[in-house]
Image (cartoon, grey):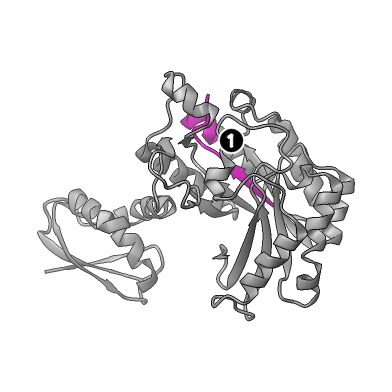
Amino acid sequence: MHKGGKIGHLVVPIFIPYRGCPHRCVFCEQERITGKAARPVTGEEVEDILEDAIHAKGFNLSGSREIAFYGGTFTGLPLAQMKGLLHATAFYLKEGLFHAIRISTRPDALDDFRLEILKDHGVQTVELGAQSMDNRVLSLSRRGHRAEDTVRAVSLLRDHGFRVGLQLMPGLPGDCRETFRSTIAKVIELGPDMVRLYPALVIRGTELALWYAQGRFRPWDLNEAVEVCAEACESLESKAIQVIRMGLMSSPSLLEEGQIVAGPWHPAFGSLVRSAIYRKRITPFLPEPGTMSRFTILSPKREIPLIRGYKNQGLQWVEKKTGAKVVGVKGDDSIPVGEIRIQGL
């Protein structure tokens, strides 16, 4: 159970690793990513998960609440299994304990018949594992679908009235900054409601791990991934497309030593990206090097964590940029969002 992207929005995830997937992509290790075994999930297990959630301390009836099926290709499941999982949620939707369902699936696993079933059972949001809008990248990653399938899927989902999310993986085989920049431009043209950015990691047991060991694949480093995702996030959000997640959500099994072989992993990747974006915005407000030796930064209270950054890396950046010592950060909500003021000493 975790908080969603909106304030007061609660999401209860139900993981179905590999279920419904026609094959395994070169980067995929769902069992380690989700911490769940790759086996069928029954309706009874769904009910148990939801019962645990509604009796948990953090369950709040005042906000919006959503059930989310993650980790596989939901609409690729046999129809009886798909309907069984959805049917297990019916009581909880009817009683108002949850308001909606979201599912994740492949762009090439949708049709009118399945979408009507989803709609009839309370699904409001469909997230597509698009990963890239470049066909060469998709082919090298053995996704089994093309960018055109994503275009068609988004149109189909819109026709049926669903909210649409796209999951993207910068740094896959064949990807580069320019290629991913083109992917973002094409995504903006599609106009989804939300996007997730998951930089490609090399995870033990995947084909990508074999390619890495053979020297056939080089993942992006952390700085490159942060820079690319910061640019993508700014571009998307400038067009009112919400970026609801950046960086893979960890599980205990994923964090075991040796599971992440290589790539831009960081436990607070999204925070690094948001801080990078913020630093760019406040640069015009910083004193020129040599003009001050010590100063205090004033900012809106809620933006203090962005200024400080992960383990105060933001303050270290400011000091390097200005050549001066930051002696403190104070909250001042009279300052406009996205701006700071400098108080010399």
Residue at screen point 50% across, 51% down: 249
Q: In which quarter of the image is the N terminus?
A: bottom right
User: What's under tag 1, amino acid-wise?
Assistant: Thr
The image shows residue 305 at horizontal and vertical percentages of 34, 64
In screen coordinates, is 262 left or right of 192? Answer: left
- Determine the residue positioned at 81% across, 74% down: 94
Front residue of 94 and 230: 94
Asked if the magenta segment contains residue 165, the reply would be yes
Q: Is residue 175 above or below residue 159?
A: above
Tell me the element at label 1.
Answer: helix
Q: Return the x and y of residue 4 as percentages of the image width and height.
A: 57, 64
| Residue 159 can be seen in this image | no
Determine the image quadrant of residue 318. bottom left
Residue 64 image point, x, y percent: 65, 72
Q: Name the residue under label 1.
A: 183
Kindly give the residue lying farthest to the bottom in the view shown: 62
Occupied quadrant, residue 76: top right
Give the left or right position of residue 178, taking residue 139 as reference: left
Q: Which of 343/72 is in front? A: 72
* Residue 78 inside the magenta-drawn segment: no
Q: Determine if residue 39 is in view.
A: yes
Residue found at the far right of this picture: 113
Residue positioned 39% across, 38% down in the render: 258
Up/down of 197 relative to 217, above or below:
below
- Reply above or below: 306 against 18: below
Q: What stretch is highlighted in magenta?
A: 164-181
